[in-house]
Amino acid sequence: MRLISFLKYGVVFLFIVIVSVSCGRGPIYKSVSEDIMQKETQFIGFDSPSAIRYAISNDKEYLYIRLEALSRPSVLKIIQSGFYIYIDTLEKKNKDMWFNYPIGETDQVFQAKLFQEGNKENAAVAGKVELESQIKDVGRFAVFVANEVEESAKNDLKEGFAYHIEAGEYGSLNYYAAIRLDKIKKGGYDALDKIDIGIVSGAFKRPNIPGNGGGRGSRSNRYSGMNRVPQAQQQSKYSPEKMRDMYLMSQPITFWINVELYKP
């Protein structure tokens, strides 16, 4: 009987441990000193679904966020459909505070091809010139929202913000944003310890195709929550390649980073 009781409580304990681990917040990344980051970018993490690696640094005045988008779908979502950095100081992944740059369009169906025909292997290299031309058309405006107050974020570090995007090697996209810490929380550096940073893009609409549940967000059938790609007979004027591209572009980039500020 004692053995049975021991095993029973052992199983319960193991279950609690597994649940605790599975419900955990994930790793806490330590921010890097901005002095070190300016000498050489040190990426602290990588998000596989979006193929984005990120570097977070700070000094006593600013939080610095550097991203490198390595996949063409992520690059196009950032520069064409808009990009948001959410900041939460309570470690609850709230979206009450955010920085929006570039300000993009999200009310259209994606029409462009992700790759040129017959050039998929070298698409990143071949697309660098095209990417540079698209970046020129990106707006120069940004918005910062905190405590339900929206302000235009002037691209001037002394005013509290700095930001830019540029084409990297082989068609990647480099993203940079700096936000003054006292914009995030009164007291700035001294009042902050850990920050949740949400990396979220806009997304294009999916076409409304018969048999596809009525378009994005529909729950008219049991498959709608799985975002399945319509079969050939449902695709109408869209080819399988076109449907794939539009599906990829309808899925926003979304991941969170839990960061501990650098404090020597």
Image (cartoon, grey):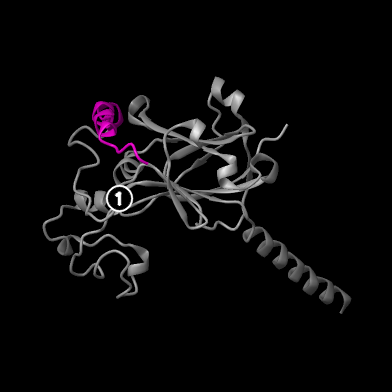
Element assignment for label 1: helix
Residue 58, picture quadrant? top right
Give the left or right position of residue 118, taking residue 161 as reference. left
Residue 139, picture quadrant? top left
The answer to whether residue 252 is magenta is no
Above or below, 119 against 244 in this view is above
Give the left or right position of residue 254, taking residue 27 as reference. left
Image point (33%, 70%), residue name: 223
**31 or 147, which lies in front?**
147
Above or below, 35 against 144 in this view is above
The answer to whether residue 129 is magenta is yes
Segment tinted magenta in the rendering: 121-141
Which amino acid does the dot numbered 1 rest on? Met
Badge 1 crowding class, 10 Å Cα cut-off, few under 14, some 14 to 19, many 20 or more, is many
Number of labels in the image equals: 1
Q: Residue furthest bottom?
A: 1
Whether residue 174 appears in this view of the structure is no
**206 or 263, which lies in front?**
263
Image point (17%, 64%), residue name: 234
Whether residue 111 appears in this view of the structure is yes
- Quadrant, the C terminus: top right
Image point (37%, 67%), residue name: 225
**32 or 99, which lies in front?**
99
Q: Residue furthest left?
A: 237
- Residue 63 x %, y %: 56, 37
Q: Which residue is mark 1?
A: 249
